[in-house]
Amino acid sequence: MRILAIGAHPDDIDLLCGGTLLRLADEGHEIVVAIATKGDVGSPTLTRDEIAAVRFEEAAAACRILGAELIWLGYDDEWLFNDRPTRTAFIDAIRQARPDVIFAHSPSDYHPDHRAAGQLTLDARIPSAVRLVETARPALATVPKVYLMDTLGQQDFAPDLFVDISEVVERKDALIRAHASQDEWLRHLYDMDYIESMRSGERDRGSVVGVEFAEAFAELRTFPAVLPEFALPGEIRPA
């Protein structure tokens, strides 16, 4: 199957579903990562253009580790909005990826870019398969299934399934370490240990379902239900 993960910023996908994508790639699924913004405000020293170039290279490096195709939409950080041109770009990104399954930000996420990217993905999902919604790319044959990703800090998110990433957590760390400039930025802004912050959240989510480390998701409930039925590798649904 083809899997598309759409993130607001260059490191969001690796942080929120990198372990799950590694497990999917190991099973032979094709992975596409779409990134909405350039990551162009997160540096204590570089210009916007300089940090955007750095973050593109970091995202490309992470995709090489994952074996994923990269779609780079190139919007400015902090200025992602659900308007017609941007929704059209999201429809085209989905059509380019031709996914069976999409991972998207939760629209209840704390960050405005995350919320916008999540809502844009949900709003573009059905139109991506509608022939008379005309964009630069042809419509999909079917509407993709969607999983909403956890929020950073596990705030305002009620997961209904978890993926055990215990066996790939160190490989996920390698994806996160590819984003070295973000590690520098978070240490500068919040005195935050990038890896340990994520490891703590993965440990918390794992404790809910009795594994060492997990990522959490909510399956998008839609009408009509979207087939095919699909189970994530290592998926655990609490009773």
Image: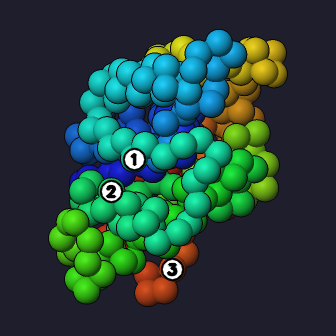
As helix, strand or loop, the secondary structure at mark 3 comes to: loop
Tell whether label 1 touches label 2 (CB within 8 Å).
yes
In this view, 26 is above or below 189: below
Residue 222's disc is 3
Q: Name the residue tied to disc 2.
A: 93
Residue 182's disc is none
As helix, strand or loop, the secondary structure at mark 2 comes to: helix
In this view, 135 is above or below 151: below
- Quarter of the picture containing the N terminus is bottom left
Mark 3 Cα within 10 Å, few/some/many (few <14, many 20+)? few
Alpha carbons under labels 1 and 3: distance apart: 27 Å
Single out the mark in the foreground, 2 or 1.
1
Measured from the top left, where is residue 50 in percent x and y? Answer: 49, 20
Measured from the top left, where is residue 169 in percent x and y? Answer: 52, 24
Looking at the rendered structure, the kind of residue marked 1 is: Leu
Q: Residue at x 69, y 16 (%)?
A: 44
- N-terminal of the pair, mark 2 or mark 3, is 2
Alpha carbons under labels 2 and 3: distance apart: 21 Å
- N-terminal of the pair, mark 2 or mark 1, is 1
As helix, strand or loop, the secondary structure at mark 1 comes to: strand
